[in-house]
């Protein structure tokens, strides 16, 4: 079981907005460590989607945004598109484990 | 452009050993920390280990401590993962990934290789 908890799946119709949560604890997100998000299309390697409080690598659309509060973080995707269908993973650092951690992943289905 | 190419995966018997390699190009390898991350079939991502830019600091997930060893050769732009005492639970795609900085174990992984599959089976 992951230290960072994500819902197994979310879904939405094209054009809609969906959010994916990432719940941690006082030794990771709550301790102030940044949360980063990755997108993995089936059969491909993960790709960095967002990093830190509000950053996106070059080429990632503004439709992807993040927020963080206390011991949790969220990824929001607006204007959902078919190409957004993928698995999404959050990542942070846990001071009690002295290790980087990934959430269990969330499968996004575009209806 | 940044490229990471893993190799060395294959089928190995339980209790066996394997060494994975990751050749980097398109950036100054000696300036960045490097990670190994694995993904069991149909499962999520599991962070395995990180090594700092100069190879002087290594950190591991509890699940692999004492069995897997990360190392690097900056003269060859190559990252390694030595795997010993393998069990079925080590079956996964192993990805190498670049850390955001040289000596930061807490940051993000900005470039990933395509992975190499390790199957532990008799």
Image (cartoon, grey):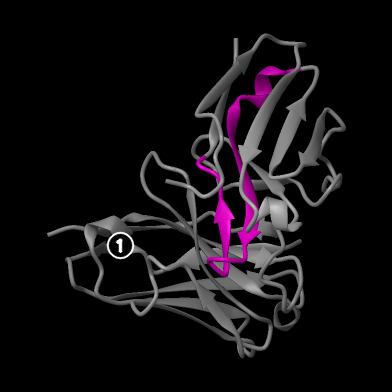
Q: Which residues are magenta?
A: A80-104
Q: In which quadrant will I find the C terminus of chain A?
A: top right
Residue at image mark 1: B10
Decide: few, some or many residues near mark 1? Use Cα within 10 Å; few <14, some 14-19, many ≥20: few
The image shows residue A13, relative to residue B30, as above or below, that is above
Q: Which image quarter: residue B86? A: bottom left
Q: Residue at x 47, y 73 (%)?
A: B21
The residue sitting at 62% across, 72% down in the picture is B34
| Residue displayed at 65% across by 80% down | B52
Q: Chain of mark 1?
A: B
Residue B87 placement, left or right of A96: left
Q: Position of residue A82 (x, y in %)?
A: 66, 18
Above or below, comparing residue A20 to residue B113 in the picture: above
Left or right of B84 in this view: B74: right
Q: How many marks?
A: 1
Which of A24 and A20 lies nearest the eye of the viewer? A24
Q: Is residue B12 left or right of residue B115?
A: left
Location of residue B46 with respect to A98 vertically, above or below: above
Estimate the x, y position of residue A55 in percent, counting from the top left: 86, 47
Q: Residue at x 47, y 44 (%)?
A: B44
In the rendered image, which quarter is residue A101 located in?
Answer: bottom right
Look at the image and say whether residue A94 sits in the magenta stretch: yes
């Amino acid at each position: 079981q992951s230290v960072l908890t994500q819902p197994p799946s979310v879904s939405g119709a094209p054009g809609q907005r969906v959010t994916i949560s990432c719940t941690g604890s006082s030794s990771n997100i709550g301790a102030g460590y940044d949360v980063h998000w990755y997108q993995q299309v089936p059969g491909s390697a993960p790709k960095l989607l967002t990093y830190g409080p509000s950053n996106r690598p070059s080429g990632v659309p503004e439709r992807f945004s993040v927020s963080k509060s206390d011991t949790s973080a969220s990824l929001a995707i607006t204007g959902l598109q078919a190409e957004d269908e993928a698995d999404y993973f959050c990542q942070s650092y846990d001071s009690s484990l002295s290790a980087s951690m990934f959430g269990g992943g969330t499968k996004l289905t575009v209806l | 452009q940044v490229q990471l190419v893993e190799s060395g995966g294959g089928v190995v018997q339980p209790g066996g050993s394997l060494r994975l390699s990751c050749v980097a190009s398109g950036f100054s390898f000696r300036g960045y920390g490097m990670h190994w991350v694995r993904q069991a079939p149909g499962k999520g991502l599991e962070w395995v280990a990180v090594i700092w830019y100069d190879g002087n600091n290594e950190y591991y997930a509890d699940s692999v401590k004492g069995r897997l060893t990360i190392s690097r050769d900056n003269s060859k732009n190559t990252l390694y993962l030595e795997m010993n005492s393998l069990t079925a639970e080590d079956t996964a795609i192993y990805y190498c990934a670049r850390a955001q900085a040289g000596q930061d174990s807490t940051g993000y992984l900005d470039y990933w290789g395509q992975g190499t599959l390790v199957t532990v089976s008799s």
